[in-house]
Each structure stands twice: as C-alpha cells, then as structure tokens.
Amino acid sequence: NDGAVDRSDRRDAARIAARGLVKGGDWVPEDRIAVVVGRVLEVWKDDLDMDRNVPEFEAFVDNLRARAPNMHRFLQQYSPEALLVIFRANSYSAKSWRGRKPLEHREQQVVEMWPDVVGDLSELLQVCRAFFVETMKPQYLPEHWDIRHRVVGRASAQEESSQVEEK
C-alpha cells in the first residue's frame, strides 16, 4: 500500500481535499472553498486542540497569505478554525499519525518513518548535516568533517559483520 490512498481513511481524503484547495489558491471559487472546508472540518472537528503559535502553523498561514491572499481572507472570515483545520489536514500522514498530534514528537516520527520511506538512516544524517551547513554557514568545521560521512550504527555494523561471515 505504498503511496496508495486508503479510501476508508476519512483523514486521508480530507488531506487530499485540503492540499487541492491550497494548491488551487485564489483560483478556487469561494463557494467551492466553503464546501471543501466544511468537509474537512467535519472530519477534523474533534482534533483541533493545537497551539497556534507553533512555527509550522505560522509558516503555513504566512505562505497562504502571500500565495493566496483572497483565500486566506475568506478562510479567516469563514470560521475561526478554518485555517487550522486546513493546516492539520494538509500535514496529515496516515503512516505517521499513530494516534499522535502531527506536531508532537516530530523528530521521533521522522526517525521512525525514514527507514520505511527512504531507506538508510545515514542518509537522514547527511540531509541534516547539509541543512546545518546551508543554514548556519559554519566557519570553523574540522578539516575531516564531511556531510557524506557514513555513520554505522549497531544494526548496520551487525549486518555488515554477518555479511562478511557469510562470504
């Protein structure tokens, strides 16, 4: 079921609708926005107890305001929960939900999901290192420091030693 939509999962259907709404932006007519938001609110009405001061939500709202100012204004006027519910639905992932709120334990969710979705965790470390270098632009890294350095953990070391023994 890789990437397939589970039609019985109402949250996944709401995610698709919310993403379509956000992607369409100001091109989506207000009556259609109202229908979609109503459907998404119906699915997410019991899961709106989220702090609105989290960076991801603020970035979502800022981005929507910049990309689709008319939709942003309409959502604010439509319902106090409209922006929040569209954000929640838009960021939903059935694979990572596991009963948690999407913004709780984000780092743990990434680490747990990475091997299933992408593969080796050392690739995640490389992505994090690249992000660190790009964002922080450190001036004094050790000469031997390398973004692509492969870290071998216990599981990887055991796998490699068993492969050597088999040969």
Image (cartoon, helix red, strand yellow):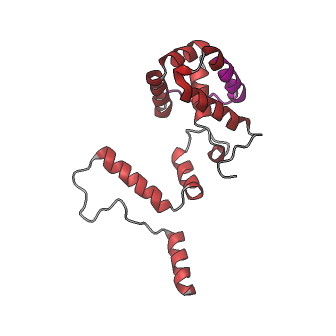
Task: Give, as a single range, the part of the protein colored magenta.
Answer: 34-53
Coordinates of residue 89 in the picture (x, y in percent): 62, 32
| Residue 8 against residue 3 in the figure, above or below | above
Coordinates of residue 27 in the picture (x, y in percent): 55, 21
Residue at the extreme right: 8
In-front residue for pair 143/154: 143
Q: Quadrant of residue 22?
A: top right
| Residue 86 against residue 34 in the figure, above or below | below
Is 35 covered by the magenta stretch?
A: yes
Residue 7 is left or right of residue 133, and the answer is right
Coordinates of residue 8 in the picture (x, y in percent): 77, 40
Q: Quadrant of residue 101?
A: top right
Is 86 covered by the magenta stretch?
A: no
What residue is shown at x 61% (from left), y 21% (from top)?
A: 81
Residue 63 is left or right of residue 143, and the answer is right
In-front residue for pair 13/112: 13
Q: Quadrant of the C terminus?
A: bottom right
